[in-house]
Image: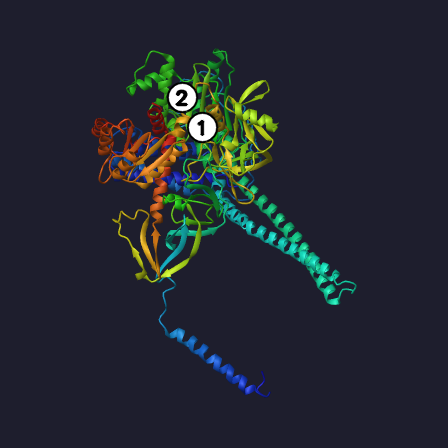
Amino acid sequence: MPQDPLRYFRIEARELVEQLSQGILDLELEAADPDIVGRLLRAAHTFKGAARVVGQNALAEQAHAVEDLLMPYRQSTERVPRETVAPLLALADEMSAAVAALAPAPAADPPAPVAGPPAGTPAPTTVRVQPASAGPPAGPVAGDPASGPAGPPRDPAPAAAPAGTLPAQAAGFAAVRADAQDVDELLDVVGEAHAQFAPLRRQVHAVERTRRSAKLLADRLRARAGQTGDEPPTRTAQSGHATAARLAGELATLARHLTDSVEYLERELDEVRRRAEHLRLVPASGMFTSLRRAARGVADAEGKRVVFEARGGDLRLDPQVLTLVGSAMLHVVSNAVSHGIEPPDARTAAGKRPEGHVEVHAERRGRHGAFICRDDGRGLDLTALRAAAARTGWHPSGDADQDLQELVPLLMRGGISTAPQVTAVSGRGIGMDVLRDISHQLGGEVSIQTAPGGGTTVELRVPLTVVSLRGLNVRAAGVLATVPLDAVRGCLRLDSEETARAAGAGALPYEGRLLPYLPLADLLPGDDRAEPARTAVAIILAAGAETVAVGADELLGTTALVARPLPELTPADAVVDGVTVDVEGIPRIVLDPHALVARAARDTPEPDAGHGGDAAERATILVIDDSLTTRMLERSILESAGYRVDVAASGEEGLAKATAGDYSLFLVDIDMPGIDGFTFTARTRAEPDLSHVPVILVSSRTSAEDRRRGAEAGASGYMAKSEFNQGELLERIRKLVDA
Amino acid sequence: MSPDRPGGADVAERLADRLAPLRASFDLSFMEPPRPAGDSGAHLLAIRSGGRPYALWVADTAGLFTDRPVTALPGPLPALLGVATFRGAVVPVYELAAVLGHPTGGVPRWLVLVAGTPALALAFDALDGHLRLPPEAVVRYGEDTSSHQWMNGMARLPGRTLGVVDLAAVRASIHTMTAHLEGSRRR
């Protein structure tokens, strides 16, 4: 725990004030732009929350004042007037000065006592917060007891959390954010050092070869010395043999020492890599302390009692992701307490325990992290939501479920809030904006479930770029791959007969059930020359509600690894979830259990599943396009779908090939020099031998007029390059070819 | 080497004879105007890919490697050989001949990192050498030369001519192919 409790707040506050100052200046420069106002509101809101957590009430009030000034322009097309910008700038300057004035605490100061676990102890994975004893007694709370929109907020969170108690979470976020780059660079260096082991190992083999040569030489010299008949071997012959034997011995020692040293160094380097990768990721528990503080602060401010629980803190993730997820969950938890949890008397009247329950739970789901906040409060106030939504022009359907389905996305889009009053902690709907923005920024998804009187569950699901996991290493068709161990339910050894039977049936009996069976060798780009294994292993994988058996040649043990996403420009089959770099610096495939399950379900033969496999194998498609890139792209898509493909670079060449060949379909570009796609279509329609071969036009033209011309010329399909969709193209082709 | 020993004068004389040109050369080096630091002329790599000779601008490359293990991936692009690690980063490796639309065969030994981002490596069969040619031996095509889709110049060597591969165009083509596939997958 840092001895300077505001260290990380200063970093974050400086960034936010900078964002505010820059954004306020942008208000003057540009025409009315609600995005800028929205960004400023979010920055002010985040600043306010952070300031409150570390007891900087004056700063929180200033951020609140910024929000007050900006709110009228939130969704307005009106430009923020100069008379509003000026006080905004003044506020930003004041905040900037106040942040700069936050002096570091003297290093010798012991950490102030805190209500939670002592600073410096690892954050527990389960944290329970007792109801704040300092809070107001249970009783009816009308509106917001803390403050009105104009008045300075009473700030109970810092009151409960004495100054000098920076949440461990804030420290965790910023500290690792700063260190991540160093760790990345260290990993790069380690990776490059690993790559140097390959030549080193080759040198070890060269020494070994030299030793064998020396031994051979020694053996021959000894044999020659013994071939001198009755004459005793000469001293020269004896000496030559002895020298060669000594040389072979010395080389053997050298090779052994060299091998030992290389292996030792490699093990050590791998340990460095393993530890560095571990450092690179931080536990989700890092955010729990501030969430607990937020729950407590809001509860105190509103006279509520809340028990906060957190689980899944050992999920390790990228610090930048954790920082953003932490910010989002801060708003979610605040909302849960402020909007969800009822005052104690209301809870008692509803037959609930007087203290509300808010639970935050982090878990890994494949390559995604799920962060769930569940409360046992009143649920979303549908009446208030309907009223708020109605003010934005929404009309209720009359069906409660359908209304909910429509209102939740509306709530997520921002602009509506159910809070009866704007308070210091909530009520502007900005919390939802932050959640939405962060979800969008991380490429994630948000889902909300609510039950009137039963509580609300908000789930933020984000893709994890770097995942630390334990993997089961397998070999199939000569390829090494890793399956996340947490999806593995068991393994079965199969003899050759069982393997053949499972492969033939596409199914394997397991614990009284018949599981879809998917041999990995069919999926991985293995060496065709690899001998089929006499025995195989079936790995029982579970993902979601499904369980499948995946066949591999052998198991190679388990390992802790860090899986990374595939780099850019690397389109791969969905079964590849990412890669991990092994001890030798070689990327290894990490498989996605969900995709394997989906593939097994798809590939399981069904009696009526006429997928056109045979037809696809027979069908030859002529691709005509003057762009090599498009030709190659279409060729690779079609070939990977099992079609034979011929290509032509012009309409003229296409016509010549069409006349000479036997094609099932023409895939034709429109804009080509010479004969264009329309002309090609019309001419082939006019040829009795070709008129039955369907034409699909693929073009960058998107107008209805062009589509009409294509149809008039006789094309069976039209696809705009801007809307190019591989699945759709293949589906259209399949239908036309099968027909 | 004592002058008192017989023949010592001869030795000293021979040494002086050998030193004189060295000294003159040393002195001369201060009198000559500074030479351009190795950047005169065109720097190219002569390579072979898919059985055909090409040249690459050295300035368009970010590193040259040999015998890096490439991990093959199942996927829709035959030109994508897989991924390999370079300085700890995992980078896609495309077969140059396949991108250029030529038949391929065997496993290319050489990998060249293409300058620019995102990281991208191209594999080719053989490196014939580093060429430093006088500027007049290299012709750069104009931007409107559409007939040379993958070439942006020509290098004249004694007895032969090499097409200079436009690595930016190769990169752009790979971007286009992968963007289409990613777009299709997202939908």
Letter of the chain that mark 1 sits on in the rendering: A
Q: Up-down: is B12 above or below A627?
A: below
Residue A521 picture location, percent across and down: 52, 33
Distance from disc 1 to disc 2, alpha carbons, whole Å, reads 32 Å
Residue A192 picture location, percent across and down: 51, 49
Tell me: A225 left or right of A332: right
**Towards the viewer: A154 or A717:** A717
Residue A441 picture location, percent across and down: 39, 33
Q: Circle 2 sits on which residue? A: A144
**Towards the viewer: A509 or A126:** A509
Q: Amino acid at mark 1?
A: Arg
**Towards the viewer: A598 or B30:** A598
Q: Amino acid at mark 2?
A: Asp
**Towards the viewer: A455 or A188:** A188
Residue A625 picture location, percent across and down: 29, 38
Q: Secondary structure at mark 2?
A: loop
Q: Up-down: is A495 above or below A194?
A: above
What scheme was used to colour the molecule?
rainbow
Which quadrant of the rendered structure holds the N terminus of chain A?
top right
Mark 1 and mark 2 residues within 8 Å of each other at the beta carbon: no
Which residue is pictured at 34% across the width and 53% down the height? Answer: B163
Which quadrant of the rendered structure holds the C terminus of chain A?
top left
First reached walking from the N terminus: tag 1 or tag 2:
2
Q: Up-down: is A289 above or below B139?
A: above
Tell me: A132 left or right of B177: right
Which residue is pictured at 33% across the width and 19% down the height? Answer: A388
Q: Up-down: is A58 above or below B45?
A: above
Residue A461 has which mark? 1
How crowded pointer 1 is (Cα within 10 Å; few <14, some 14-19, many 20+) is rated as many
Quarter location, residue A387: top left
Quarter location, residue A571: top left
Q: Secondary structure at mark 1?
A: strand
